[in-house]
Amino acid sequence: MKEIPSEIYLLIIEIGEFTIADLKELTFVCHQWARVTLPLIWQTRKFIENESLKTFKNILKNDKTFLPYGRYITRLQIEELDKNPPIFIDDSQISSHNSHDGLCEIMRLGNSLLAIRIMLNSVTLIDFTSSYIVELFGKYCPNLRNFDIEHFQCEPVSKSAISVMLKNFQGSALQADETMENLRRLSILKINGISDLSFLSKFPNIEYLFIGDFSQINDYSFVNIGKSLITKLELVKTPTITDKALLILSSMPTLVKFYIRDRLQNVTEKGWLSFVNRPEGCSSWVKLKIDDGRQINSKFFMMLDKNHPKLKRVSIRGLNYNLHSEEIMNSLKFSEAWQFYKSNSHLHWPIRIESRKFRMKYVQKDVYRELKNN
C-alpha cells in the first residue's frame, strides 16, 4: 500500500485551520501524520526557566529521536523572569562542542533560527552583560531576521556588541567590514550616552527599527538612520529630536510608517510641515502615530490630504486647538476625525470605535460611518 503524499496532509491541515493542540493529537495517529505535524509543532519554542532548557538540551543530544527536531525551530523565546536556578551561559561550551547548557545547545541551531526574543533577569547576568548575549547570538545565528533582547536592572546593550552581530564568517576573528545582511528587524531598547548610530550600516537590509530609551539622540544619529532602507521607524524615549531630524526622515525614500511616543520640546510647526512635505521620489506616508502634536497645525493636515494618497491611518495626541482652522479641517477627509478630537482630546483617522461585542475596528473610509450590527 502506497503512502499518501505529505502534501495531502499539509492541505488537510491548512483547510482545517488546526491549532497546536490539534496537531499534537494528530501526531499520535500514525508515523506519517507525526512526520508532518512534528515539524510544525516545533517551529516556535518558548522557555520560561532553566529546567525546560535542560530538557530541551537532552532531547537534542539524543541521537535516537524520531525526527531531528532542532532543525525545524525558526522562532525562539526565552523568558527567565524570577526562576531559579538562573539560565547558565558559557561561550566556551559552545566552541568546545561539549555543552551542558540548554541555551548554548539552542545557539547551535543558528542556521534555522529566524527570530529570537530573550528576557533575562539580573541574576543571570552577574558575570555577563546583555551585550555578551548579543555577541553570542550574532555569531552563531547568521540567518536571524528579528532580534529583540529585554533585561531587568542590567547594563544596556553596547554599541560594540551590536556590531558583532555579523554575517556568517570563517574562523574566530571578526572583520570590521562584515555585515549581517539577513537581519530585517532590529530592536534597541536602550542606548546610554551619545551615539551617531553608525553601526546601523552593519545591517544594510533592515526594514524595521525600534529605538527605546535614547535620551541623547541627535541630528548625527538621524543622518545615519537616514542612510538606511527601513520602511518603519518606532521611537519611544527620544526627547531631543529637532526639526532637522524630521526633515531627514521625510527625505527617506523607503520610510512609510513612523511612530513617536515622547514629548518633543525642540520641534516647531516648521519641522512638522517639512515632515509631510516630502521631496520627489519619496513615497506617501502610510501610517503615522504622534504622541506630541502641540506644534502641528491645519496646514499639516492639508498636506497629508493632498500629497499622501496611500495614507491609511493617523493617530495624533496633544493637538493645540488654537493652531487649527475649523473651516480648513472641516473641508478635509479628516473632518469627522476632527469632530471626534474636540470631545476626546486626540485625533484618530479613520475613526476608531470601541464596542463590547467587537474588537477595536477602524472604518477604512475618508469619512466616519457608524458601524451597525449585522
Image: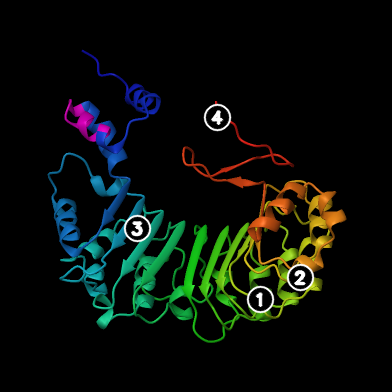
CA distance for labels 4 and 3? 49 Å
Query: Which one is closest to the eye, mark 4 or mark 3?
Result: 4
Region in magenta: 22-31
Q: CA distance from mark 1 to mark 2?
A: 15 Å
Depth check: 200 or 234 in front? 234
Give the left or right position of residue 209, taking residue 106 as reference: right
> Which of the two discs, 4 and 1, labels the residue nearer the N terminus?
1
Single out the mark in the foreground, 4 or 2: 4
Q: Position of residue 211 (x, y in %)?
A: 53, 70
Task: Name the residue that disc number 3 marks.
Answer: 110
Image quadrant of residue 256? bottom right
Q: Secondary structure at mark 3?
A: loop
* Residue named by callout 2: 247
Tag 1, which secondary structure? loop
The Cα atoms of the two marked residues, 2 and 3, are separated by: 39 Å
Amino acid under disc 1 = Leu
Give how far apart the Cα atoms at labels 1 and 3 are: 40 Å
